Image (cartoon, rainbow, N blue to C red):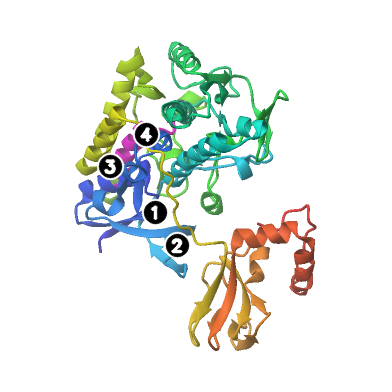
């Protein structure tokens, strides 16, 4: 039987691992990639998507195009059973749980964000992790310019034209540079906005920006950004945020309607649910990239803590979470899995950085290449050349080159495109006999019957008998969400033609937390099941 290798995640680590595995094994292994989207996002280009120099569709590549011979499963990873060697995913429209077996498992899920120490930041800050984040930021910037063009209220205009980026690492610096360039090149189309009214700022808690680069390059970056009108606040943190203001750690209140947070990396909930020990929020691996205590489980990329030498203890002793390292880690994992399957000796991951690159906007950048510091236009040209060469697929490279060429010839597009999103509160119609959900499906909605009726089947775990309950107009089901349940315990079908109101999980939990009458209504339900419902100012078991 062919070896089954399952890769969780389709980013730099996951995608390049799958490609390297296919080259190693050919058709002698079943290789599967599980990813929530069916495309690979080239994250270094996200700031350029946000700044409008690249269209969103050209910063991604379909996984099925770049992973020839690899089975791609579009699904959400729910859990991993390491003893049974099974990954449980939710897939399809019904979010059915499906078990995916493996012989070797590669975890390349990246990281999420955690803004819990800064009240209001989670609710009001824009992020720069996904393609949707970049697309949303571009639309938001255009919206602020449009609003500032027509408003007659000075304070509203001031807030709309104040743009704040939190975090002075690669992502923050590149994002603020692209934002400023987009704004500067767009102002001629907004005659009622004076350039002096625009305020763009970068906030960094550390003593300097670009800590990963030599100090002279960081100093050059500061001078370039300031010369182009970007304020830089060092040794400054975020205390709190609202929809109109940001409060810094030194007490300054900034009127702004645009907060972009590139800080707060944290393990994803699915990684936390795996039960693996975490160090600094990442999965510790040995130098062969194997997870301790699991001979057939490997990890790489942002979610893994990878030592570069024995006895690693300092920050510089571990692989940085960059695309450059992820690509090399992928090749080493593929080689070691191949060696493990063939009973050969595993080799440690060893790689010395060839340098670092950062774009500053306005055709300027900073780079350290093989120990040489480069600044200005040459560094920016190297930045673009390197990432163009790293892009997967000749078609993607050509499209990005066309985008860049057109960007140099004319103004950036100010078109705001609206993408359809399923509303969090909506009506759904079912015919008699239609399945609404099955036991075991993912809990992702709360339902209220408007007309008609449904029937709920609940199996008794002790007797095995099935209890049947009919729910008519005014009745509801799916409220186990308030317990934090992720799986359905019942099966529900339409008993007759019916109309139901569906509320998404997040909206239901927000309403339960913030609306006391709603919460009190469900208190008897919770007490009946032996669960104490918290008060309004407490967590509701999310």
Spatial CA distance of label 3 from label 2 is 27 Å
Residue occupied by mark 4: 412
Identify the image quadrant of the C terminus: bottom right
* Image marks 2 and 4: residues in contact by CB distance under 8 Å: no
Q: Name the residue under label 3.
A: 335
Q: Residue beneath label 2, please?
A: 89
The answer to which quarter of the image holds residue 265 is top right
Are the two marked residues, 3 and 4, in contact with CB atoms closer than 8 angstroms?
Answer: no
Cα distance, mark 4 to mark 1?
28 Å
Q: Which of 294 and 39 is in front in this view?
A: 39
Query: Which of label 3 and label 4 is nearer to you?
Result: 4
Identify the mark nearer the N-term, 3 or 2: 2
Q: What stretch is highlighted in magenta?
A: 317-337
Q: Is residue 333 magenta?
A: yes
Is 412 included in the stretch rendered in magenta?
no
Q: Is residue 56 left or right of residue 276?
A: left
| Residue under label 1 | 37
Task: Tell me if 349 is positioned left or right of 512 in this view.
Answer: left
| Image coords of residue 33 (percent x, y) | 34, 54
Is 216 above or below relative to 278? Answer: above
Distance from label 2 to label 4 (Cα)? Answer: 41 Å
Neighbour class for label 1 at 10 Å: few (<14), some, many (≥20)?
some
Q: Earlier in the sequence, mark 2 or mark 4?
A: 2
Label 3 vs 4, first from the N-terminus: 3
* Mark drawn on residue 349: none
Q: Gap between marks 3 and 1, in whole Å?
A: 27 Å
Tell me the SS state at disc 1.
loop
């Amino acid at each position: 039987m062919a070896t089954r290798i399952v890769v969780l995640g389709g980013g730099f680590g996951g995608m390049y691992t799958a490609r390297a595995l296919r080259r190693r094994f050919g058709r002698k292994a079943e290789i599967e990639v599980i990813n929530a989207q069916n495309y690979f996002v080239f994250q270094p280009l996200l700031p350029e998507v946000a700044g409008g120099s690249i269209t969103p569709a050209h910063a991604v590549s379909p996984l099925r195009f770049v992973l020839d011979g690899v089975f791609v499963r579009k699904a959400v990873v729910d859990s991993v059973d390491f003893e049974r060697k099974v990954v449980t995913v939710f897939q399809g429209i019904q979010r059915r749980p499906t078990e995916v077996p493996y012989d070797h498992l590669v975890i390349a899920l990246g990281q999420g964000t955690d803004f819990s120490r800064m009240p209001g930041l989670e609710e009001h800050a824009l992020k720069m992790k996904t393609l949707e984040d970049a697309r949303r930021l571009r639309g938001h910037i255009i919206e602020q310019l449009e609003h500032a063009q027509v408003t007659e209220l000075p304070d509203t205009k001031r807030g709309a034209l104040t743009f704040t980026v939190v975090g002075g690492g690669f992502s923050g610096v590149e994002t603020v540079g692209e934002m400023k360039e987009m704004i500067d090149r767009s102002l001629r189309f907004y005659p009622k906005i004076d350039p002096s009214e625009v305020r763009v700022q970068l906030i960094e808690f550390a003593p300097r920006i670009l800590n990963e680069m030599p100090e002279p390059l960081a100093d050059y970056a500061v001078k370039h950004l300031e010369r182009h009108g970007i304020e830089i606040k060092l040794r400054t943190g975020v205390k709190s945020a609202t929809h109109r203001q940001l409060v810094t750690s030194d007490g300054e209140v900034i009127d702004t309607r645009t907060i972009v947070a590139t800080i707060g990396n944290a393990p994803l909930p699915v990684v936390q649910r795996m039960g693996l020990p975490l160090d600094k929020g990442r999965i510790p691996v040995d130098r062969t990239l194997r997870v301790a205590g699991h001979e057939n489980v490997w990890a790489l990329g942002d979610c893994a803590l990878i030592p570069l030498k024995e006895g690693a203890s300092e920050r510089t002793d571990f692989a940085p979470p960059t695309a450059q390292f992820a690509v090399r880690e992928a090749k080493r994992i593929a080689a070691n899995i191949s060696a493990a399957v063939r009973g050969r000796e595993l080799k440690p991951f060893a790689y010395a950085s060839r340098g670092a690159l950062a774009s500053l906007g306005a055709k300027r950048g900073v780079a350290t290449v093989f120990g040489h510091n480069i600044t200005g236009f040459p560094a920016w040209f190297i930045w673009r050349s390197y990432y163009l060469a790293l892009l997967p697929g000749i078609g993607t490279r050509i499209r990005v080159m066309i985008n860049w060429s057109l960007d140099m010839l004319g103004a950036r597009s100010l078109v705001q495109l609206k993408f359809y999103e399923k509303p969090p509160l909506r009506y759904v119609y079912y015919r008699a006999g239609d399945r609404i959900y099955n036991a075991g499906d993912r809990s992702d909605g709360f339902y209220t019957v408007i007309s008609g009726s449904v029937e709920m089947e609940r199996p008794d775990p002790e007797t095995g008998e099935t209890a049947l309950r009919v729910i008519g107009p005014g009745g509801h089901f799916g409220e186990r969400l308030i317990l934090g349940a992720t799986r359905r315990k019942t099966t529900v079908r339409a008993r007759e033609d019916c109309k139901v109101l569906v509320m998404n999980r997040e909206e239901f939990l927000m309403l339960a937390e913030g609306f006391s009458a709603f919460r009190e209504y469900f208190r008897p339900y919770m007490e009946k099941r032996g669960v104490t419902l918290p008060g309004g100012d407490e967590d509701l078991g999310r």
